[in-house]
Amino acid sequence: MTAENPVPITGLILAGGLGTRFWPLSRSQYPKQVLRLLGSESMIQATIERLLPRIPAERLVVVTNTAQAEVINLELRRKGWQDIRIILEPEGKNTAPAVGLAAVLLGAAEPTGLLAVFPADHFIGDQASLLAALDRGAEWAAAGYLVTFGIPPNHPETGYGYIKQGPPLDPAGTGFQAARFIEKPDASQARAFLDEGGYYWNSGIFLFRRDSLLEAFKRYLPEVYQGLARIQEGKAGPDFLAEVYRDFPNISLDHGIMEHAARVAVVPVEMGWNDVGTWGALQEIFPRDAQGNVLLGRILDRGSKGCTFFAQSRLVATIGLENIIVVDTQDATLICHRERVQEVKDLVAELHRRQMAESVQHPTVQRPWGHYTVMDEGPGYKVKQIEVAPGGRLSLQSHQHRAEHWVVVQGTARVTIAADITSVASNQSIFIPAKTAHRLENQESQPLRIIEVQTGPYLGEDDIQRLDDDYRRV
Amino acid sequence: MTAENPVPITGLILAGGLGTRFWPLSRSQYPKQVLRLLGSESMIQATIERLLPRIPAERLVVVTNTAQAEVINLELRRKGWQDIRIILEPEGKNTAPAVGLAAVLLGAAEPTGLLAVFPADHFIGDQASLLAALDRGAEWAAAGYLVTFGIPPNHPETGYGYIKQGPPLDPAGTGFQAARFIEKPDASQARAFLDEGGYYWNSGIFLFRRDSLLEAFKRYLPEVYQGLARIQEGKAGPDFLAEVYRDFPNISLDHGIMEHAARVAVVPVEMGWNDVGTWGALQEIFPRDAQGNVLLGRILDRGSKGCTFFAQSRLVATIGLENIIVVDTQDATLICHRERVQEVKDLVAELHRRQMAESVQHPTVQRPWGHYTVMDEGPGYKVKQIEVAPGGRLSLQSHQHRAEHWVVVQGTARVTIAADITSVASNQSIFIPAKTAHRLENQESQPLRIIEVQTGPYLGEDDIQRLDDDYRRV
């Protein structure tokens, strides 16, 4: 095939990660792949955007799990990608089951079609190099190789897995047999890999024929293969799927298949890649000032060195810090020595154990129709700022225990209460009694903003009966 | 006189400090002396409380300046001390003019009466020792000495001024002639003072006869003395006072008088004293954990050492920090290496230069009737949570540019709008149009809490016309 008419590739975007390492910006209900860490697009949006020139939206599939379906769906919808298919795992089981599930649910229409696998939450600075490497890899995949993509290391990194190259697959060296996979090495090993050459960082991007992949599952993960076969036989209703999935091992594609398979290739590619594995990664991706600091947000610093300061909205003032990472969000601040950034996940585990709300959710919650921010809570009341996007409409709903006062502060609201529909303009207010069906809607072309004061004996988000919903949440 | 009938002392509480070193907890409109840094009482409340057994409220005088009059007044009122006299300097001019002004404004009824001077913002752990030292000092003051109180150093502190003792005034050594005042020494000097003995930290507490003090002003600060004399002659209307004050030097009592005067005594006293000069002081006052940390508020730490973490309400999570001070408030966070804590004042100067709101005020603002918190601000609107104390009543007021929606979420409001008075219960709301006289009042025995949504083209706090006010702010 020519560059004008390349071989079709189906792209699997793996978006099931929890991203506990990016707390407090990530929360269990707001994982790393939906964060706007590196710009105005979320990680998953940027991942899809950079693939679109080579893989059209109708050939892209996002794999995630039910817990994260709503936020992922929202990220796609915001870019007009609501038609991109989403495959839901009943629970997160690492990459081997996720890729296997997608491979069988895609159907058997293209038994030798090419599947590529992309993490949804990595940074790639050089899109053109990525796409060119995919085309090089496609040749070896078509020839039956399980293809990995290897990043030539530029420093002795101990945070990545490595792939050692074997004999070249062609005289030009566009690909090599993969000789060996190596877990995260220690510092002296990493140094030796760099000096010796022929070692690559494992990018987590894969490319293979569908039949090569399933053959490898059959051979190296037979118990998963059998489960996948049962799913493919069409017995996979939601309950059945969950039941099959429960028995799957929690195993990565690397460990489960790549390390064992005979015909594995590595295609080298330099593309400004970073797995953005911890808060430390910002130091490698963003430009640093003369003192080696990365300052993002409202920061006032005096004489710090080698630091990363990330302030979401509040003011952070720093004096004389060295190698410290600060992440400031609406309701929580992390301050961590750079060398101990791996412990953020342990800290989040501790927050979960203590059932602290800051591990689960932000004060600002994204919804299909817009977002809301909890501004104040006290005995018997809660105050929210609610923003409804143009054309957005909340569900027709009622609450058993709470009444709501709405004051419109921007735009015009169309408000349904029982059988009445009212227009409520800026600087007007309206009262929603408990146990009454109501709906909030923005038919204007500008955002609608209201202040909602809830009062009542119980104010949990679960006191909601959805009678009708544009976003099928009934 | 006997202990049962001690010689009367008039106490001057100097409460004009700006406290920029305690940003972000202190703000220019919320100085150090009103902070609740060390417990449930503010610094000035604790200062007065510990003096009351020896100096009754009618003999206490608080000296501050007009900019801080309202917050200081509030701190006194909250303890039922609204009758304690407040003397207002037209502007802050350090301690010599402040003490001189109080000495002349107190009147000439007790020309040889004793005046004691106390900073409003120091920590003293041992009240009994302070009061006993005052009685010892009173004897020397009555004999015509300008008496200072010296703290025996327990470590080679470089942050305090020192006083070197001269010959003892009596065989028991209850007081010494002061041989010399020494500015903050360097480390080796401080070490030598500690080893040599006979040096004391200058506590900033003084005691003298009124006539001794004025005599010293006449001799050592003659230009201030002349100004004070003109004020004493009764020409001191507010404009006149400001005019006289403008020409006063910015000079401390130590530099202006004590260092030069002939008959100065130092009375040693161990009383758990700390001048609470920087955030570093918390480490000396509060108990430390096994790793030498002081943790105050909602802190989750992993393995930090020698740190001070102060979280006002939000969650602060820390990993692997050493000798770092963190101060987290509603709208700003300070993170500072302990050795550079003196630079906080420079940082605040920078905030002022940049006119950043975080240098001036907290989101929560104290008022005589209670307090309010700005929760949200956007184009054309502002949201406040307002709490009115039992019996509290806001001024009768009107706004030119803004309307207000009030939703009562706790208690019952008595609301005046134009000629109507309404009772608004919890879960009810009421609308206040622009340009309409209105008043909010809490006649119940529980706090009243309302959510106020302001709307209008201009929402500054200065859009207020006070028609009547219980707190004389009209």
Image (spheres, coloured by chain):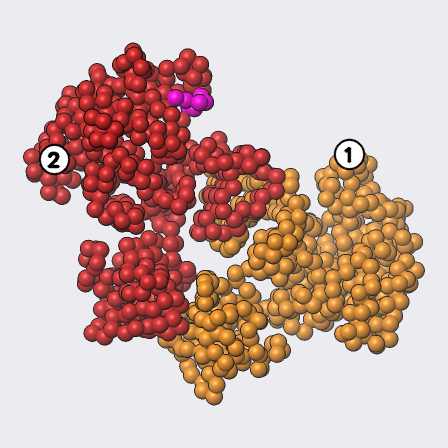
Chain colours: A red, B orange
Read off the chain for label 1. B
The residue tagged 2 is: A107
Read off the chain for label 2. A
Q: CA distance from mark 1 to mark 2?
A: 81 Å
Q: Which residues are magenta?
A: A152-158
Query: Where's the N terminus of chain B, which quadrant?
Result: bottom right
Tell whether B227 sits left or right of A73.
right
The residue tagged 1 is: B188
Residue A408 tag number: none
Q: Are marks 1 and 2 on the same chain?
A: no
Q: Given contact means CB atoms under 8 Å apart, are the residues at marks 1 and 2 in contact? A: no
Amino acid at dot 1? Ser
Q: Nearer the viewer, residue B451 or B71?
A: B451
Amino acid at dot 2? Gly
Please identify the quarter of the rendering in which residue B229 is found: bottom right
Tell whether B386 sits left or right of A27.
right
Give the class, few, some or many, for how many residues have Cα within 10 Å of label 2's Cα (few <14, many ≥20): few
The percent coordinates of residue B400 (x first, y second) are: 52, 77
The percent coordinates of residue A471 (x first, y second) are: 22, 55
Helix, strand or loop under label 2: loop
Please identify the quarter of the rendering in which residue A222 is found: top left
The percent coordinates of residue A30 (x first, y second) are: 34, 46
The verdict on residue B218 being magenta is no
Please identify the quarter of the rendering in which residue B112 is found: bottom right
